[in-house]
């Protein structure tokens, strides 16, 4: 689902007790045919894309990959998990022929390319 900051802020507060917008949220499902739902804020994605000097479409792909990795069981709550998610995100984006952002991006700050 693509939404705005107001909608995702409400979800972030309701499900994570964080009263602020975020870029992406994942909601796993108890359904063997559906991993779950991914909600992405276009407002936040636009700001992050501009800050990273890369296309909004690429930012949306990065956020979708990040959400999907959560749905398949990855977690970024500690350094090792975050580094693994960043590694997998780089790999997936590269395989999909989506160039990584030319400047520092918040998702890629803790590991080298």
Image: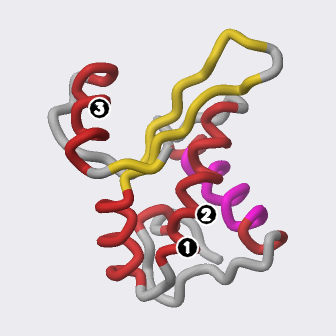
Task: Say whether marks 2 and 1 touch (CB < 8 Å).
Answer: yes
Q: Earlier in the sequence, mark 3 or mark 1?
A: 3
Magenta: main secondary structure equals: helix
Answer few, some or many: residues within 10 Å of disc 3's Cα (few below 14, many 20 plus, some between 14 and 19): some
Q: Position of residue 88 (x, y in %)?
A: 72, 55
Give residue 14's quadrant in the image.
top left
Numbered mark located on residue 61 in the image? 2
Question: Which residue is denoted by mark 1 in the rendering?
Answer: 57
Q: Is mark 2 on a helix, strand or loop?
A: helix
Task: Say whether marks 3 and 1 touch (CB < 8 Å).
Answer: no
54 or 86: which is nearer to us?
Answer: 54
Q: Which residue lies furthest to the left in this view?
A: 19
The count of marks equals 3
Q: What residue sits 81% from the left and 15% below the top?
A: 32
Question: Which residue is denoted by mark 3 in the rendering?
Answer: 12
Q: What residue sits 61% from the left and 36% below the top?
A: 70
Q: Does the magenta stretch include residue 84?
A: yes
Magenta segment boundaries in residue numbering: 82-92
Give residue 62's quadrant in the image.
bottom right
Real-space Cα separation, disc 2 to disc 1, in angstroms: 6 Å
Real-space Cα separation, disc 3 to disc 1, in angstroms: 23 Å
Quadrant location, the C terminus:
bottom right
Q: Which of marks 3 and 2 is nearer the N terminus?
A: 3
4 or 27: which is nearer to us?
Answer: 4
108 or 72: which is nearer to us?
Answer: 72
Numbered mark located on residue 101 in the image? none
Q: What residue sits 53% from the left and 56% below the top?
A: 63
């Amino acid at each position: 689902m693509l939404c705005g900051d107001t909608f995702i802020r409400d979800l972030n507060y309701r499900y994570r007790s964080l009263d602020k917008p975020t870029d992406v949220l994942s909601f796993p499902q108890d359904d063997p045919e559906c991993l779950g739902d991914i909600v992405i804020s276009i407002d936040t994605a636009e700001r992050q894309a501009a800050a990273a000097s890369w296309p909004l479409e690429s930012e949306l792909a990065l956020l979708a990959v990040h959400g999907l990795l959560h749905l398949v069981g990855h977690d970024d709550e500690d350094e090792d998990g975050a580094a693994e998610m960043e590694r997998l995100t780089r790999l997936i984006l590269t395989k999909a022929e989506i160039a990584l952002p030319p400047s520092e991006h918040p998702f890629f700050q803790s590991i080298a390319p």
